[in-house]
Amino acid sequence: MSLVELIAQADERGLAVSGLACLDRCVPLLGGDDDILRPLWQSLTEAADSGDWGLGLEQARAGLDGSDPHDEAALLARRMLAAAPAERFLPQIRVWADACSVAALQIHRLLDPAEDEASCVDDRREGRTEGMSPLVAAELRRQITVLEVVAGHGPAGLRRALEVSTEGRRVLRAVVSRRTRNKVGPA
């Protein structure tokens, strides 16, 4: 099943997890620490209060204010955070999750030194994967895995979704670090 189909079939929690996981993997571009989105993850558990999402979002926005305004990848990540709905209800959360999916794939495409042969990330989301660059391929797999885990296990799948997101964040942090070193050059 394509990523587009998985997003179309996802429920409210699945969509919130999907969007949040995309944003979480892009936190290195926003200058945030690894736990900055933890309150949002906790707000997706069954025991969480419905207002926890909005409070967690406010905290994340306040804590993620540092990024290069001239960096296209960081700008896309900032837009993901800015566009997050204050309440995680359909249809707003569906629109946000879909936009986060596109933005995260585009960010990975921008940061991948390998060329991606597709003209746009929509091809990737629809299942056309020939000539895909490694970083984009890994992000696509992560997005699909997160949606499948939550669809198959509900709230019990949150832990695995967070693990997948954490792995992706580490990869992106390494890519961002390497890119920064290459811009600065040897000392």
Image (cartoon, helix red, strand yellow):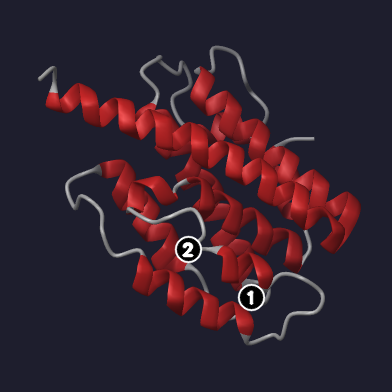
Q: Which mark is residue 36?
A: 2
Amino acid, disc 1: Arg
Q: Is residue 95 left or right of residue 3?
A: left
Q: Is residue 137 left or right of residue 106?
A: right
SS at mark 1 in the image? loop
Labels 1 and 2: the sequence-earlier one? 2
Relative to residue 113, is residue 15 depicted above or below?
A: below
Q: Position of residue 3 (x, y in %)?
A: 69, 40
116, 182: nearer the viewer: 182
Relative to residue 114, is residue 93 depicted above or below?
A: below
Amino acid, disc 2: Ile
Q: Are marks 1 and 2 in contact (CB under 8 Å)?
A: no
Disc 1 versus disc 2: distance between alpha carbons?
18 Å
25, 4: nearer the viewer: 25
- Give the total of numbered labels: 2
| Residue at the image point whose x is 67% and y is 31% from the top | 141
Relative to residue 68, is residue 58 depicted above or below?
A: below
> Considering the image in quadrants, where does the N terminus appear?
top right
